[in-house]
Amino acid sequence: MGSYLVTQGPLSDALRHMSDGFLVVDTAWRITFANLEAERILDSAVDPAGRLLWDVFRDIGVPHLEAHCRRAAEGTPVELDVQWPTGQFWYRIRQAPFPGGVTIHLSDVTARRRRKAERATIEQVAARRVVTIQQLTEALGDALTVQDVVDAVADHVLRPFGATGLSLFYQENDRLQPVGAVGYSQEFIAEILNMPLKDDWPIAHAIRDRAPIFISSADEFIESHPSLAHVPAVGGKNAWAALPLIASGCAMGGCVIAFDRSHFFTAEERSLFTAISGLVAQALERARLYDAEHNRAQELQRGLLPGALPSPPAIRAAARYLPANKDMEVGGDWYDVMRLSGERVALVIGDVMGHGVCQAATMGRLSTAVHALADLELPPDELLTHLNDLVARFGDDSYATCLYMIYDPTTGDCVFSRAGHPPPAVVHPGGAVFFPEGDPDPPLGAATPPFDTFRMNLREGSLLVLYTDGLVESATLDIDTGMADLARTLTAALAEEPHDPAAQNAFPRAGRAAVEEEQDHLESLCDALTTTLLPVQRSTTDDTALLIARTHVLRADDIASWPLPEDAIAAGQAREHIRDQLASWGLDELSMTTELLASELVSNVVRHAKGPIGLRLLRGDVLTCEVSDGGLSTPRIRRSSETDEGGRGLQLVAALSSRWGTRYTATGKCIWTELPLPVDSRH
């Protein structure tokens, strides 16, 4: 091999047999010397000496080799790492000038680069896991419920560690109850229900010993737990990390992280899983307390709201209550439907300002007060006046909005008052949505009575939508825009109605199928409004109550009324009218009782009150008998002694009727009684 650097002697031998490749290139870029290692690296079948450097390196593909060599020839040493075409080796090419050309030194750096890549990979994995722990810590810090904890662990532990299964357990009375599972079949979840703590399950051992257990394969699982040999197949897993959950010094449950394939747990992974179990235990303990408090709050809220709305024939109603997206606080929104006399119905909806147990208690007191005042048959403005006085006595920080409405199916008249509450949405059959005009009075607790009264007449099949401001107002939505959205959503939902409600004339003669169909439609309408106007992504700080009612009018042939003279013959005429009318309705079996009730009431009016006297019968879901007069005195039951010749009339009325009472009218008062219809006469 030719060389003018060293042609003979020990130096030439040393260069030729050195462990790194060595080349010498003259000023014409021809190779003048190449040692044995260089020939091997270059995989040259012939001696490269005398050949152009570019020709020898052409197949290797060293980027910008000529530019680097010329730079080295100018006096600047150049160094670069190049991956050889086979992809298995990396070489560092160092080019340095000397007076007769350039020397090129080839060093195998494959092992060095592999170690560097492995260190980089380890550092990246460690960094990713540090980020994972940070993200898990943040997610667990935000988790409120047990399900939130399960979701956080599933999202931030399973994927980063390549795991596919997760199960969390509570320890209760020496048994383990699963509270969340991901990546398992229902068959397997049923297998682990109500697991005794003394069982042979790895998680039971981990909790008893307060130490994690790592199982790398199904064979290892079966060998250490032969009584559970079926578990790997049923669960579909082949490696497990069973971690005890210890919080406040107590083992309160366990966590199992599982893998589809066999998995060797490194010391680092074992440490990380142990650290994760501590984070999960603390989060799960908080979530468990939260769930318990939240459940109690929900029970309180449900207890304060009507369990099931009454279904008087005058209306069909459906309602929803949706709590705000706030921790566990109960709210003060409420609604109700109440049967009044004369087939009339009262609807109420209200909102106590604020959240918490105090507000829920205020709501409960107001709801109870509304029921008591409704039994007195007070008109809406007077009822709100009494509520305003009640709220004012609660203290300076108590305020509430309220809308109270009375619907009379004998006339279709609807009268309501509202204290700081948004107006109802009203839809006549085939008509557009509208909101009755008029400014509301201030909220209860801040208002100065009297309250304004609003009146409207509703046709058969009209729709009333009562709601609290949580449905139409939020931090990002003003109430006018919200009410416009409500009108559009309601219009779109009603456009999909399969029938005309007015055509059914559902009160009181609709069959059960028609009633159920209408009820189902109202329930669907509630769902349509809440899901559209309160999407999950819209965060709200206020509760929402929604009450939807379809109104129906009493048919003319179910109403009968007569004027009566103001003398002794009035009672006889009343009995005759009742006898004839009940015969035409096929209710002869109620005739004797109804005649007796009316005779007693009319006789009292003639004796103690003043005219004009009127008699009215209503056939709804009960038979109502009403006697009206021009007096304002309220009849009351009094205790009669054995020697009294009178004073037992109202005792007789109370004993014979299922319900009775008095209400005031524009011209005086009305005393009413109700009798249940015979089963075969009910509609």
Image (spheres, grey):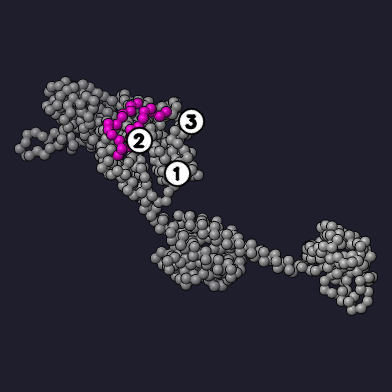
Which amino acid, mark 1? Thr
Residue of label 3: 495
Residue 162 visible somewhere in the drawing: no
Front position among marks 3 and 2: 2
Q: CA distance from mark 3 to mark 1?
A: 28 Å
Question: Quick check: 187 above or below 618?
Answer: below
- Give the class, few, some or many, for how many residues have Cα within 10 Å of label 1's Cα (few <14, many ≥20): many
Residue 355 appears left or right of 486: left
Camera-side residue of 188 and 301: 301
Q: Secondary structure at mark 2?
A: loop
- Give the class, few, some or many, for how many residues have Cα within 10 Å of label 3's Cα (few <14, many ≥20): few
Magenta stretch?
A: 434-456
Instruction: Please provide percent x and percent y for residue 63.
Output: 82, 58
- Return the mark for residue 679: none
Instruction: Please provide percent x and percent y for residue 178.
Output: 46, 60
Asked whether the beta carbons under mark 2 and mark 1 sit within 8 Å of each other, the answer is: no
Residue 613 visible somewhere in the drawing: yes
Residue at left 89%, top 65%?
101
Q: CA distance from mark 2 to mark 1?
A: 20 Å
- Per the picture, the main secondary structure of the magenta-coloured stretch is loop
Rendered image quadrant of residue 517: top left
Residue of label 1: 540
